[in-house]
Image (cartoon, helix red, strand yellow):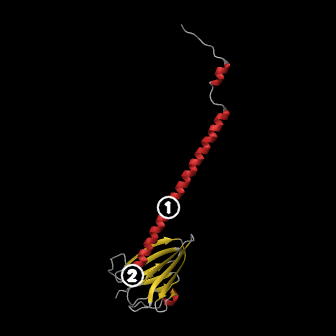
């Protein structure tokens, strides 16, 4: 036997779904939750980019320091450090062709908000250039006068040659970058190559 039941209007009203206010409250809460997730993800992405940038800068600074160190550790006896408005140059056996095998003119260029190094040996028709860093605002080179115990500017020492009894004991390279960071590299000149 089949029976039919009669639904009242009250029972039909209870089964129709959510009201407009309930839907709007749900949408607002979902929007707030999604905006908080977006903020956290955005901050995470920003932090990741800062860390990558810092790691890359540290790596390039390390490379700059290492090449500068090798240039001055392998400076040629009797050569001079030439200082100009856009950089300085030295004669060294540090090169990227053969380890300690040939003498090159190493020119450090600080123009155009960049740090570049160029090496050349004219007799071998060899030259090599590469860029180390960007964003350089200013630079200054000084030399430690061992006899007087003072730092002197690059212009004052550029005409002196490096000898085994040289009074030039160290160089100091001061770099200021566009982001406000500054770096001071001090490099001792302990030995010269004959």
Identify the residue under disc 2: 73
Q: Residues within 10 Å of mark 2 (few under 14, many from 20)?
A: some
Q: In which quarter of the image is residue 4?
A: top right
Judging from the image, what secondary structure is the residue with disc 1 in?
helix
Q: Please name the residue shown 51% across and 59% down the image.
A: 49
Pinpoint residue 159: horizontal percent, then vertical percent: 47, 91
Residue 64 point in image, percent of width and height: 44, 74
Q: In this view, does 22 lie above or below 137?
A: above
**Quadrant in which residue 162 is drawn:** bottom left
- Which residue is located at x 57 percent, y 49 percent? 38
Q: In which quarter of the image is the C terminus?
A: bottom left
Q: How far apart are marks 1 and 2 (CA)?
A: 33 Å
Sequence-first tag of 1 and 2: 1
Front residue of this view, candidates 59 and 81: 59
Q: Write down the residue under mark 1.
A: 51
- What residue is at 67 percent from the left and 34 percent from the top? 21
Q: Where is residue 53 in the image (x, y as percent from the top left)?
A: 50, 63
């Amino acid at each position: 036997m089949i029976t039919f039941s009669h639904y009242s209007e009250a029972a039909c009203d209870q089964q129709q779904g959510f009201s407009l206010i309930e839907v709007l409250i749900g949408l607002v809460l979902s929007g707030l939750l999604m905006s908080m997730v977006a903020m956290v993800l955005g901050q995470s992405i920003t932090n990741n980019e800062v860390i990558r940038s810092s790691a890359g800068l540290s790596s390039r600074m390390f490379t700059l320091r290492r090449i500068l160190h090798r240039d001055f550790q392998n400076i040629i006896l009797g050569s001079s450090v030439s200082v100009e408005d856009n950089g300085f140059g030295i004669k060294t056996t540090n090169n990227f062709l053969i380890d300690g095998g040939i003498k090159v003119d190493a020119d450090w260029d600080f123009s155009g908000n960049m740090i570049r190094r160029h090496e050349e040996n004219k007799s071998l028709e060899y030259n090599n250039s590469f860029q180390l860093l960007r964003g350089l605002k200013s630079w200054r080179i000084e030399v430690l006068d061992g006899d007087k115990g003072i730092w002197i500017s690059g212009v004052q020492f550029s005409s002196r040659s490096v000898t085994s009894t040289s009074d030039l004991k160290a160089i100091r390279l001061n770099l200021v970058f566009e982001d406000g960071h500054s770096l001071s590299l001090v490099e001792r000149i302990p030995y010269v190559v004959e």
